Amino acid sequence: MITWFSGCSAMLFHPDDRQYASPKDFNLSYEVVTFDSHDGTPLSAWWIEPPGEPKGTVFIVHGNAQNISTHFTGFVWLAKAGYELFIFDYRSFGNSGGESDLGGAALDTKAALEYVLASRRGEITVIGQSLGGALLMNALKGKQEARIRLAVFDSTFASLPDAGNDVLSRSILTWPFQWMAYLVLSDKYDTIKIAPDLTLPKLYIAGSRDPVISPNHSWQLFDASARPRAFWLVKGAGHIDAFSSQIIQQRFLELLARPAFDPEASQMLIFDTISASKP
């Protein structure tokens, strides 16, 4: 019954090896690199360079479906603003080898993060979107790395079985089968178990109209998290859609420009991007 079609599905990955776009389409230079996951699976990635001297490095863990040639386009604005981007493909996505599965993707994310930390000496910002947010938080588990200045979780689930239950409850056809989510979907990588012990600065972002992962998941993670932490709810935004708002982009760039974060910071902001964007 459950062939969960949502973008965060851990049961059914949607890898694609087609190249849809390139940073060159946006007048950005980039380098294709390869590295190995922890089990030896070859992985492919892009270093995307800003027009001038980089202000910093941003490590991106994309969501399910397609590959980096589609997901990078949502972060072009960051490169244009002066930040170097690193984005990689999990096994079987894009030009990466292997067969897709949740455990393998978790290994790949850990290996990618270690590769970036070994490749750059300065501070880095890490961003995980949707399923990528859960994989990122698992990669950060137990890691005491002062060079990670901010971890961003965009439209990320607190519990995979709970997210599956949410999806099944939205249709009269699947509503009777909600209980199956707790039988079929593993809670091994649930972020709600990790968030309380993750001491680095965290930002949770959610769209109020997300049809895939309820913004309540981001709120639960924020509420459970150790400080410093922040929660941004973007009114009218859908799934991994908040960063398409110029208001959110500008506020995020202001956040990255701060020299330090108050270790006791705890902030919840609601952005009404619809009314704010009107002339």
Image: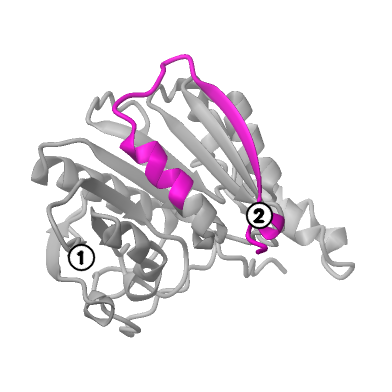
Drawn side of residue 55 relative to residue 275, left or right: left
Q: Can residue 86 be seen in this view?
A: yes
Between 148 and 169, which is closer to the camera in this rendering?
148
Point 71% across, 57% down: residue: 275
Q: How far apart are marks 1 and 2 (CA)?
A: 35 Å
Q: Quadrant of the N terminus?
A: bottom right
What is the tally of numbered marks visible in this picture?
A: 2
Q: In which quarter of the image is the C terminus?
A: bottom right
Name the secondary structure under disc 2. helix
Q: Could you say which disc has been placed on residue 276 in the image? A: 2
Q: Does the magenta stretch include residue 33?
A: no
Point 37% across, 70% down: residue: 73
Residue lying furthest top in this view?
A: 264
Q: What residue type is labelled 1?
A: Trp
Read off the residue under disc 1. Answer: 46
Q: In this view, does 260 lie above or below 62?
A: above
Point 53% across, 53% down: residue: 247
Q: Which amino acid does label 2 sit on?
A: Ala
Residue 113 appears at what percent x and percent y? 24, 45
Q: Which is nearer the N-term, disc 1 or disc 2?
A: 1
Q: Give the range drawn in magenta.
A: 250-279
Q: Is residue 261 magenta?
A: yes
Drawn side of residue 195 relative to residue 39, left or right: right
Q: Is residue 90 above or below residue 163?
A: below
Drawn side of residue 134 relative to residue 80, left or right: right
Residue 65 appears at what percent x and percent y? 46, 71
Between 175 and 135, which is closer to the camera in this rendering?
135
Drawn side of residue 222 relative to residue 54, left or right: right
